[in-house]
Image: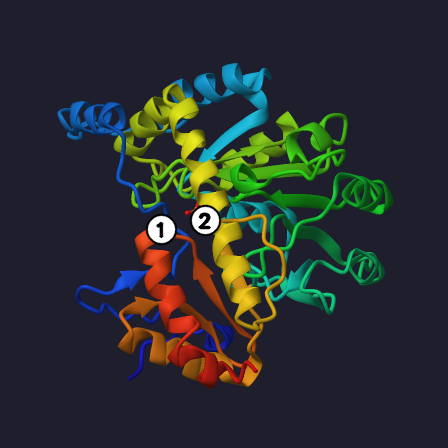
């Protein structure tokens, strides 16, 4: 007899491992291309000596370091096994079966999955024609079953970014019993135009008890392989999250590496300037080649190629570059080192142009 599992899991796609292509340049997962700093590597090696012990389930030292850096009390911070697990915890603490979670779509692939796993009803709201969040439509989608709203800022995979004023108006308009998660995985890559204020979720969460900010060590801090992120929220939400937290899921190497990374924040954040400069260079070259490329505030750019996306991504592999395909929608290109980006641009401005149908 077939073992019986929940029939509703059929709606969740099974995990398909990414294709590994020997020697190809990987611009598919928004990772940092540079390896860990020596100080971070040392902290990991030192922590390796005590992996016979369980980690600190409360990530006390890490949360203390974050509290000092963010100048807030430690009871407003939770650590998680990547911010993906914090997304999951937020659905678990807000939703019973059939409660609703609103998010913009296309956005982060994890949102529909964490909703489905928790038995919550996903309410995806189509992006605006310029690939950003349609905040008006998201407000209009609120019902008395709405428990949680994800706002991905900057948005993965389109790179779009909300301004401080529009986000503030949105937060003011959401009833304050509904939790709003500001997913700021790419916060460190945002750059404001002169005279324009950045939407800093942590500042916006000040005095708003329903706003949760999610950040991660996976992107700008370069620790994707160790799995650690954090949430900033009202202490009551932090306590609720701790109740559904998978025990010991933030491992001891991750905790120590994150603390060491905060210690080297200046150096790590300086790296984002290089990524931002490359992002603008890549976008400029693509625009010049005739592509339509929405502005990006993250460490990737988005090509809304529609039906041509799959073929464009497949042919890139033959040119030695792995990109991320969203079939029927577009291709996301992570920004790598200059020589990696050059390899991609050689493809995109050469063979790729015809496949993309760029005039
Ligand atoms: C990469 C990413 C994350 C971070 O995931 P981790 O689990 O922290 O590695 C969170 N949100 C979005 C939108 C992302 O793109």
Q: Is residue 181 visible?
A: yes
In this view, 314 is above or below 136: below
Residue at image position (31%, 67%) is 321
In this view, 137 is above or below 47: below
Residue 97: horizontal and vertical position, in percent?
Answer: 63, 61
Q: Nearer the viewer, residue 136 or 347?
A: 347
Disc 1 to disc 2: CB gap under 8 Å: yes
Dot 1, how many residues are within 10 Å of its Cα: few (below 14), some (14-19), or many (20+)? some
Q: Quadrant of the N terminus?
A: bottom left
Residue 278's tag is 2
Residue 90: horizontal and vertical position, in percent?
Answer: 58, 46
Q: Secondary structure at mark 1?
A: helix
Q: Quadrant of residue 261?
A: top left
Q: Nearer the N terminus, badge 1 or badge 2?
A: 2
Q: How is the image coloured?
A: rainbow
Residue 355: horizontal and vertical position, in percent?
Answer: 45, 85
Q: Which residue is mark 1?
A: 338
Look at the numbered disc 2 and say if its residue's Cβ is closer than 8 Å to ligand 1: no
In this image, 342 relative to 110: left or right?
A: left
Q: Quadrant of the C terminus?
A: bottom right
Residue at image position (66%, 35%) is 201
In this image, 56 relative to 241: left or right?
A: left
Q: Secondary structure at mark 2?
A: helix
Dot 2, how many residues are within 10 Å of its Cα: few (below 14), some (14-19), or many (20+)? many
In this image, 298 relative to 199: left or right?
A: left
Q: Nearer the viewer, residue 83 or 196?
A: 196
């Amino acid at each position: 007899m077939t073992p019986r599992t929940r029939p509703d899991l059929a709606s969740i796609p099974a995990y398909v491992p990414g294709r590994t292509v020997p020697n190809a340049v990987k611009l598919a997962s928004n990772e940092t291309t540079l390896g860990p700093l020596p100080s971070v590597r040392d902290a990991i090696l030192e922590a390796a000596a005590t992996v016979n012990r369980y980690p600190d389930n409360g990530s006390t030292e890490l949360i203390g370091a974050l509290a000092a850096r963010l100048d807030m009390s430690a009871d407003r911070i939770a650590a998680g096994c990547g911010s993906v697990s914090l997304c999951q915890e937020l659905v678990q603490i807000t939703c019973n079966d059939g409660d609703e979670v609103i998010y913009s779509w296309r956005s982060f692939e994890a949102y529909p999955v964490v909703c489905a796993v928790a038995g919550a009803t996903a309410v995806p709201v189509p992006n605006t024609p310029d690939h950003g969040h349609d905040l008006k439509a998201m407000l209009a989608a609120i019902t008395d079953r709405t428990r949680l709203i994800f706002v991905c800022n900057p948005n993965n995979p389109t790179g779009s970014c909300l301004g401080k004023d529009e986000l503030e108006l949105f937060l003011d308009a959401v009833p304050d019993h509904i939790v709003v998660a500001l997913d700021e995985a790419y916060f460190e890559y945002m750059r404001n135009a002169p005279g324009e204020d950045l939407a800093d979720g942590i500042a916006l969460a000040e005095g708003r008890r329903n706003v949760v900010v999610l950040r991660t060590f996976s992107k700008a801090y370069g620790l994707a392989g160790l799995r650690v992120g954090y949430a900033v929220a009202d202490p009551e939400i932090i306590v609720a999250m701790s109740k559904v937290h998978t025990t010991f899921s933030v491992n001891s190497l991750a905790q120590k590496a994150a603390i060491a990374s905060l210690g080297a924040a200046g150096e790590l954040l300086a790296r984002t300037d290089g990524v931002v400069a490359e992002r603008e260079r890549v976008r400029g070259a693509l625009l010049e080649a005739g592509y339509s490329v929405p502005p990006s505030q993250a460490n990737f750019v988005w090509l809304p190629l529609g039906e041509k996306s799959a073929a464009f991504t497949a042919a890139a592999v033959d040119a030695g570059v792995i990109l991320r395909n969203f079939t029927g929608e577009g291709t996301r290109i992570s920004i790598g080192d200059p020589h990696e980006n050059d390899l991609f641009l050689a493809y995109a401005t050469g063979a790729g142009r015809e496949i993309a149908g760029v005039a």
